[in-house]
Amino acid sequence: MNDLKKEMSYHKKSFVGYMLWFRYAFLKFKPFTSLNKIFCNYLESPGTKAYSITEAKELFYKFKSVNITTVLTHGDLLTSEAGQRHKDILLDIARIIFPIFIIKTFFPKNGLFMLIELIK
């Protein structure tokens, strides 16, 4: 019998990642700051990691089957409260102009949550 294992990781190429990069790299005139550094310093706690789908597949290469899906979250769609350090006028403006329908329709694979199903 195959053993099914389920994992969740942060997806690097998500709208949350892009918004954090825009705020903490681009607007601070540091456009070459990597998404790795952005997630490490600004998403959750220091050292937080996020992976691309390719990187996640490489992490689990020994498994017989790796199925990865991404999910848009409330953070990607700006439909929930943000952490205290992210609250400011930029976030208020973004909530007004943010194209939720367009993101849900055309970019559903750019969600923050990467759900991984593995079979040994």
Image (spheres, rainbow, N blue to C red):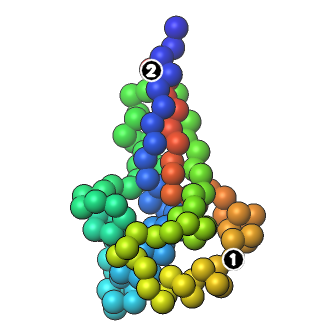
Identify the secondary structure beneath mark 1. loop
- From the image, state whether disc 2 or disc 1 is nearer to you: 1
116 lies above or below 39:
above
Give the CA separation, mark 2 to mark 1: 40 Å
Find residue 43 and report its horizontal and vertical position in percent: 37, 64
Q: Quadrant of residue 79?
A: bottom right
**Amino acid type, mark 2:** Lys
**Amino acid type, mark 1:** Pro
Q: Is residue 21 visible?
A: no
Q: Which mark is residue 116?
A: none
Find residue 47 and report its horizontal and vertical position in percent: 25, 58
Horizontal side of residue 24 vs 16, given as left or right: left
Instruction: Name the residue located 30 percent from the left edge and 57 percent from the top edge.
Output: 48
Which quadrant holds the C terminus? top left
Q: Quadrant of residue 69?
A: top right
Instruction: Name the residue located 40 percent from the left edge and 69 percent from the top edge.
Output: 83
Of the pair 69 and 82, the residue shown nearer to us: 82
Q: Are marks 2 and 1 in contact (CB under 8 Å)?
A: no
- Within 10 angstroms of label 2, few (less than 14), some, or many (20 or more) residues? few
Which of disc 1 and disc 2 is earlier in sequence?
A: 1
Q: Is residue 48 visible?
A: yes
Find residue 40 and report its horizontal and vertical position in percent: 29, 63
Q: Quadrant of residue 26?
A: bottom left
Residue that sits furthest to the top in the current view: 1
Find residue 28 and report its horizontal and vertical position in percent: 33, 89
> Can you identify the residue that label 1 sits on?
99
32 lies above or below 14:
below
> Can you identify the residue that label 2 sits on?
120
29 lies above or below 36:
below
Residue that sits furthest to the left in the current view: 46
Identify the secondary structure beneath mark 2. loop
